[in-house]
Amino acid sequence: GSRVEKPVPKVGMVFQAALLLKWRSVLDNVLLPVELSDQNPSQFRDRAIELLQLVGLGDFIHKRPAELSGGMQQRASLCRALIMDPPILLMDEPFGALDAMTRDEMNIELLRIWGESSSTSRQRKTIV
């Protein structure tokens, strides 16, 4: 019950639309929550690249959002939500605009990535 006045690193959010900043590269978009939380982005760069590789965007880290398909943008948005390893991930139908096959793949990838991060962390994780 307190007012939220700054980014909350304990909560990741993935919206229905990717909401990437068009002037930033994919990698810089993923690192945005790190910058907003006054952390050093260079300490999270390897994790960002690892997440992008896990979702099939390893070859696109220097591309701008306009150069990606909608599904690719959504995967980058998912990486941005996971970069700070939040114990809570809120999702507003982020895979709704994807085709059925890609949506199934993304659901499997999300569970795998979430499961891997849960096994290396002592904190319990929740997806809503």
Image: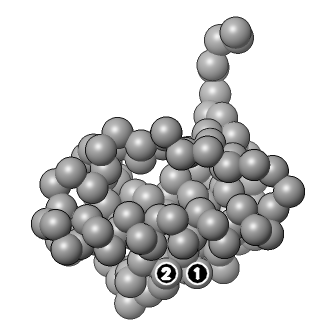
- Please provide percent x and percent y for residue 57: 38, 81
| Residue at the bottom extreme, as displayed | 59
In the rendered image, which quarter contains the N terminus?
top right
Q: Residue, x 30% and y 44% (percent of image)?
A: 93
Pinpoint residue 53: horizontal percent, then vertical percent.
48, 84
Q: Nearer the viewer, residue 117 or 79?
A: 117
Name the residue type under label 1: Glu
How many numbered discs? 2
Residue 125 % position (x, y):
68, 49
Residue under label 2, please give it.
Answer: 54
What type is the residue that disc 2 sits on? Leu
* Residue on which disc 1 sits: 50
> Which element carries disc 2, helix, strand or loop?
helix
Observer-nearest of 91 and 7: 91
Question: Which residue is painted at 21% across and 51% down in the image?
Answer: 96
Q: In which quarter of the image is residue 92?
A: top left
Image location (x, y in percent) of residue 117: 69, 66
Q: Residue at the far right: name it.
A: 122
Q: Can I make out residue 32 in this image?
A: no
Q: In this view, does 38 lie above or below 79?
A: above
- Residue 84, placed above or below residue 5: below
